[in-house]
Every structure is written in C-alpha cells, then in structure tokens.
Image (cartoon, rainbow, N blue to C red):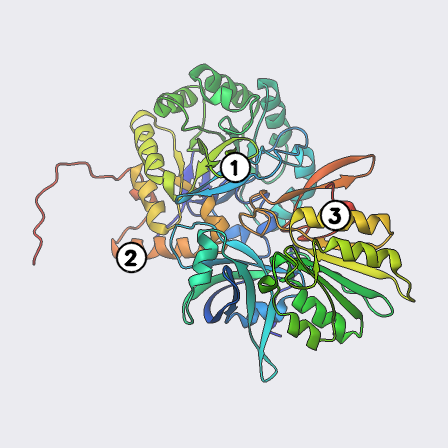
Amino acid sequence: MNLSARIGPLTLKNPLIAASGCFGYGTEYADLVDLSSLGGIAVKGLFLTEREGHPPPRIVETPAGMLNAIGLQGIGVHRFIDEKMPELRARGAVVIVNICGTTLQEYVELAKILSDVEGVAALELNISCPNIKEGGITFGCSLNGTADVVSAVRKITRLPVIPKLTPNVTDISSIAKAAEDAGADAVSLVNTFLAMAIDVETRRPRLSNIVGGLSGPAIRPIAVRMVYECRQKIRIPIIGMGGISTASDVLEFMIAGASAVQVGTANFIDPLIWPKLLDGLHSYGERYQVQNISDLVGSIDTSAREKEWISS
Amino acid sequence: MISAPAAIYLPVVPLDLVAEVLSNTHLASDYNVLALAAPGIAERSLPGQFVMVKAGDAIEPLLRRPFSVFEVLKDHGRIVGLSLLSKRIGPSTRLLFDSKPGDLVRCLGPLGRPFAPIAPPDEGWLVAGGVGLAPFATLAETLRARNVRVKLYYGARRAAELFYVDAFERMGVELVLTTEDGSLGERGRITVPLERDLQARSGAGNVTIYACGPEAMLAAVAKLADASGTACQVSVERVMGCGVGGCYSCVIPIKTPGGGWHHVRSCLSGPVFRGDEIKW
C-alpha cells in the first residue's frame, strides 16, 4: 500500500507524525528511531524565549490515560534553530514546528523567524494548550481568536499553516471552519482535554498546576467523533490525534476523515512503536487490497446496516 | 558484550525487551525482587542506571515505571538477566509484586547517567533509604572490585525492611544500619550516624557519598556533604513518563550561575546528580 499522505502543499511519506510535546525536539529519539522513517515530527511547542514550565508533579496516570501539565517548558525558537535543526536536517526529519505565543504578534514573529529556516516543513499553531493561562488557548477557544491567529500567520509565511485545535469548546467543527476560512492549510485535532485528579488521602491535587490535559486511549472515541464532525464541515485536510496506540487506531481516525495522524502518549510507553504501526498499516492494505492509504480517508460507511448472516 | 551502535544522545543505545520473569522473591510485606531475563540490558548497564518497566500489555496501568537495576544476574559467569527491587505502592508495582515466573515484562534500558565510580585511596560511603538501596548492589560490587573501601549507611522503618545486608557484608562492605523503630541498628534516621562519622572522619583518602532514597533524605545528605566539604552524588526519583527525554515530566531544578535555577530532565541529565548542583 502506498502510504503517502497529502497535507495541503505537503506530501508526507506516511501518515504518522510524532505529536508535539510527546517527542521532545526529535533529537532525543535519534538513537532509538530512524527519524526519517516518520511522516513528520511535530516538535515540542516553542515560544520566542526559553521557559521553565510548571514545577513537578507534571504528570499523573488516570484510567487508560494520563494528565499532563508541563507548562510548555522549552528552549525557545532561537536555540531550537541553532541547536536542534542541524541534527534534524542531517537525519532527514520532516519538521513541523509547533509555535506558541501569548500575543498575536508573538505568533507572527515566530512564523517570520521560522519561514527562513531550511528544513522547516510546516508550522503548527498551538492555540490549544490547556496548561498555560496567557495566550494560546484563549485564541483557540473562540472563532475570532482562531481566525485572527491563522490569518495573521498566513499573511507572512509561505509554509503550510496548521492550527492545532482544542477539544475544550462547544463545537470544534465551527472552530475548524473558522481556521479554514482564515487560510489554514490543514487543522490538527485534538489537543488534550482539560481535566484533574485529586489524592483523596491528602486532598491535594495530583498535579502542581491543579489541572492538566488528559491524553491516551481514554480520549480516543471522543477525538474520533470530533475528527468525523470536522470532516463534515471543512475541506482542508485534518491531522487526527487522541489516544492512538495501534495501527487499527490510526485507521479509525483516517476512516473518520483524517489525512494523517499524530501519535503522542503511546510513544511514551513504546518509543519503538513507529515501525510496528507501519507494519500494521501495510498488512491492513494487503488484507483489503487498498492501493493508497489516502483512499481510506473519510471512507466511513454510514449507510443503513443490513442484517448480517452469522453462522452458528 | 553484544555489539551496539554508538549512542549520540544517550549514554548507551537502550534495548526494549519483552523479558520473561525468572523469579519473584517476596521479601517483606510489600517488597519484592523481580528477576528478569534481559541479559542484553544487564550487560550494558552501569551502576545507577535504570530501566523503564511495564508488566503486561494492558492499557491500565498505562505507563511504564522507572526502576534502578538492582542486580546483574549471572549463571556460571554468564550474564542472564537483571533484577529490580520494588515496593508495592500502586497498580503497577502490584502487578510486579504478583508476577509469576514465565510472565512477560516490557523492559527498556539501560537509561540515564550512572554514578561516577571512585578509586582508592578514596572511600565510598553509600547512603540508602528504603528501596533506595536498589542502585547500590552493583555500585558496591564495582567499587569493591577496585579495592575501594565501602561503607553502607542503610536506613529503613524496621528490621524486616532492611534487605540483602548479608550480600553487602560478603562483598566486604562495612554496614551502618538504622531503623525508625529501633528494631535493628541505631534507632532513628540514617543521617544521624552519617553526620557523626563525617565529623569524626580522619583518613588518607577523600570520601565520596553516594545517596539514594526519599528526596528529603537526599536533601539532608547533600546538606551534610556540603557542610563537611564532601563530594556527593545523589540518585533522584521523580515521576517519569517515558524515561528517554520525550515528555518533560521528570524535571528537577538545577542551580545556575548567578543564583538562578533551571529545570533539567532527570531521565537524561540524571538520575545521578551532584548533591550541590540541585536546588533542594
């Protein structure tokens, strides 16, 4: 099966992208994974400047999932370009840079800086991190805020612009539509679900930030539904994510309407997951004689069910 | 040694093995030593390094958990696996506690920066609290093989929770034991005899303290080391998501020049740090 995936002007060799915040800057995994074997790497969210993030504890496990409140600790865009990009280029990684601003101007500034950097394949606009108070999610929670960031960045870069959407809204498909109308090349969804966990023995929150974002298999059915809803409403490609751990999960998102997917939490459990997912996609392609994985995108069959003949 | 590609970012390229449980020895109420058939990881591991472990393939518990390599297991001189010293405190450690020989455990490692070993005439003083004993079996072995004089300061709540004392004695390690209830050794915390001995010390070589245990103990030991001008390496345990630098959950504040601090990932920059570089 031909695994190539089209994300607007970008063609990825396969639909598997490492999710931002779950794969460091990519270089951390260079000893473990052939970085060029991935469709892309969405690097950890970058601000203009370095940030220390929240104090620990920053993660806690919950049923079939985990909460995180890292607080976007990061080295800032300039150090990223100087210290990480040369290695990522040398290893043939397709780099999607996730950018975060506290103001519209910061997004624009980041986009300008990165537009001139060799090897940057696309910009993912983080307007959905639930763990920082300023900027970010305040844009992503409103139609106008989303449109403002997307169109401002759109104006100053030729790189594909991919806003990453939050599920913590009433209707994610209307946000996706606002992003499309503002000139986004694609949307990625979903970021984590705002959540919390409390230690009843001490009555203390389990995260220093009190609240955090829920990821992992627990959120997958909701994320699939959101991809499906957005597919009905927009024409630009969707990068789907939320709890993907197996090739079957990848296919579920694609059949719901995602052109590519991101894998995050599962990579923590199995950093060598990538070739396993690729193998699983290929064997599905053989089983159903699918020539191009892109033929599966949005191929969900919602026609009336016929009664199945079940032999006993 | 099996030949391995050179690591660029990690101390060694880790292996991810689905390891069979060789044995599971229950020590006291909540403690067990789990032997895993992971010779490839055992061969490459250095004292102080850790593995990321997950019992079974279920999505609950979801994440792996970090464990120091406790012992490198040998059979007729050949390395056959490694063991973990675990305390049952939650769902993951309960699964490990209940494991049976033949069960499969996912094991990724070795990971992290190891202890820096010393050489004679310097002395190594190992300070362990509870399951913080885990990295010291291999460290003591390494140091004793170099003819370094080794003392183990080992504290626990009660006598039944002081493990493998005989094994350390057989290596020629001097023991200083404390229990909180006084059931074995001196009653109280392990930092009491440590402080006394640091003050009374007179010898040809310098002392390096190696510490592993609860963070409050590590902070106290680092403070004693500082006050007496003693070198000190501590192995910290923070909540870890991935063990390889991807998630940024296991950070610890490290002092920076000018009185500031900076969060570093204990999986990559640690788990072993100099006691005086951490902002406690």
Q: Position of residue B235 (x, y in %)?
A: 68, 54
User: Which numbered tag is attached to residue B122?
Assistant: none
As drawn, is A229 to the left or to the right of B182? left
Q: Amino acid at mark 3?
A: Ala
Q: Which residue is mark 3?
A: B220
Q: CA distance from mark 2 to mark 3?
A: 61 Å
Q: Is residue B83 above or below residue A102?
A: below
As drawn, is B256 to the left or to the right of A312? right
Q: Are marks 2 and 3 in contact (CB under 8 Å)?
A: no
**Are there few (<14), some (14-19), or many (20+) residues within 10 Å of tag 2?**
few
As helix, strand or loop, the secondary structure at mark 2 comes to helix
* Badge 2: chain ID: A
Q: Are marks 1 and 2 in contact (CB under 8 Å)?
A: no
As drawn, is A65 to the left or to the right of B212? left
**Are there few (<14), some (14-19), or many (20+) residues within 10 Å of tag 3?**
some
* Badge 3: chain ID: B
**Are there few (<14), some (14-19), or many (20+) residues within 10 Å of tag 1?**
few
Please name which of the two marks, 1 or 2, marks the residue nearer to the observer: 1
Q: Position of residue A174 (x, y in %)?
A: 36, 21
Q: Amino acid at mark 2?
A: Glu
Q: Are marks 1 and 2 on the same chain?
A: yes
Count of all numbered marks drawn on residues in the image: 3
As drawn, is B89 to the left or to the right of B56? right
User: Which numbered tag is attached to residue A286?
Assistant: 2
- Residue B23 shows in this picture: yes
Q: Which residue is mark 1?
A: A202
